[in-house]
Image: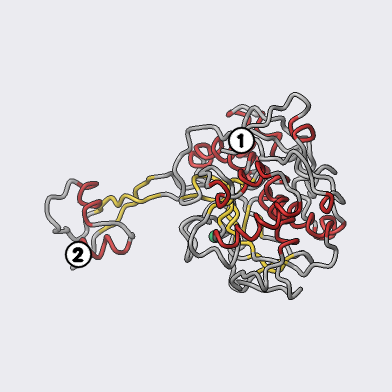
Amino acid sequence: MLSAFEAIAGLCILALPASGVASMPASGPAGPATAAVSSKGLEAPAALLDLSDDELMARIAADPTSLGSLSIGTPGRAALFNSVALPANPHWQVAPNSDSYATSETIAFLQAAIDTVYDLFPETPPIVIGDISAAAGGHLKRHQSHQGGRDVDVGFYYKSGTSQWFLPASPANYDLARNWALVRSLVTRTDVEMILLDSRVQRMLYKYALGLGEDKDFLDHVFACGRGLRDAIVQHVVGHRTHYHVRFYNAVAQELGRRAHPLLVQMNLMKPAVYTVSCVARKGQTLGQMAARYHTSVRAIQQANGLRTTALTAGHAYQIPMRGSAPPMTQPLVVPHRTLPSSTPATLSAVEWPTVETLYGTSGQQQDHQ
Ligand SMILES: [Zn+2]
């Protein structure tokens, strides 16, 4: 699935083999480390999952950027380390005022999914990509998630044949063929964790895909609108009739991030989950003003300093408890096996699709998406 555009855009940070993302580790630390080489000739971060904590520490001390991009925390409270700006690409446009920093894995997944649409439909207008994350992750305007470089707002393909952003999908404007190619590709060609999409749009896609000859059981595991499975990949959330909200698992960026986080904190390269700063009270300053300045509460400062009243003593140093950007993650990441169809409709067979065999080997047992 390597296209000429990848080489042109210099996007090949994780060098993908011809079979797309199939050889990326499907699970956390136990997954096979790929010996891919990045565009800079650096060792690919996947190999770093094999290092001991001491070796990882030495690596961070020598060159923290050699870890590649890390996604640390949860989608609603995360930090991004060594983030990558979404590069320019003829297959996509960035929506105005978007924050589009991601992990290299997220960008490689987006590219793999979108390139498949072009392989099937060479005449396709660029899709519009909205917010991903801020450069260092953390809270992003208007969003509850989008904190760790794994959540991407992706626009729709429209029948008009032009790039549009935030236009509500309707039977009159929604390009079923290209949108189904994109969703099928996200599901089978990437480690997608979930897609949020209005159920009205889901039903259009479901009906279209069934009409193409797609396996009904596969569609019922893809779309919540089918049998209403709570573990379906595509779920309805209000506000998603204008775009897909796609969340990817990052087998390397998340697991390496989980392991590197305490080391990065120890080496002062990242804030701990909770820390304190010292603040000397000025004359006339109130506890409420101090709390507001540090975005914390009066009560939190009282507790941290054993204060029973709200009185401050000018010139005295108070400890202010602060919340860091990411909580420590204790459990290793296990990326579930992908949801794969048992067959491919003839109209989509112009491209090679991942199968259980190509992804997980002949002994690979497919498990349901979790
Ligand atoms: Zn979103």
Farthest residue, direction left: 309
- Which residue is at 49% across, 58% downward? 237
Left or right, residue 177 beside residue 337: right
Q: Toward the viewer: 163 or 132?
A: 163
Q: Toward the viewer: 304 or 245?
A: 245
Among the two numbered marks 2 and 1 on one chain, the one whose residue lies closer to the N terminus: 2
User: Disc 1 marks which amino acid?
Assistant: Asp
Q: Quadrant of residue 290?
A: bottom left
How was the colour assigned to the protein in this rendering? Answer: secondary structure
- Tell me whether the residue at label 2 lies in contact with that at label 1, contact meaning CB atoms closer than 8 angstroms: no
Q: Can you give x and y, in whole percent of width and height, for residue 75 in the image? A: 50, 50
- Which residue is at 75% across, 24% downward? 363
- CA gap, disc 2 to disc 1? 56 Å
Q: What is the secondary structure assignment of the residue under circle 1?
A: loop
Q: What is the secondary structure assignment of the residue under circle 2?
A: loop
Q: Toward the viewer: 115 or 4?
A: 115
Q: Quadrant of residue 257?
A: top right
Q: Nearer the viewer, mark 2 or mark 1?
A: 1
Residue ID for mark 1? 368
- Within-10-Å neighbours for mark 1: few <14, some 14–19, many 20+: few
Residue ID for mark 2? 286
Q: Quadrant of ligand 1?
A: bottom right
Left or right, residue 73 beside residue 17: left
Q: Can you give x and y, in whole percent of width and height, for residue 162 in the image? A: 74, 75
Where 246 falls versus 48 (above or below)? below
Q: Can you give x and y, in whole percent of width and height, for residue 318 in the image? A: 25, 52
User: Disc 2 marks which amino acid?
Assistant: Thr
- Within-10-Å neighbours for mark 2: few <14, some 14–19, many 20+: some
Left or right, residue 279 beside residue 87: left
Residue 31 — which label?
Answer: none
Q: Can you give x and y, in whole percent of width and height, for residue 155 in the image? A: 64, 65
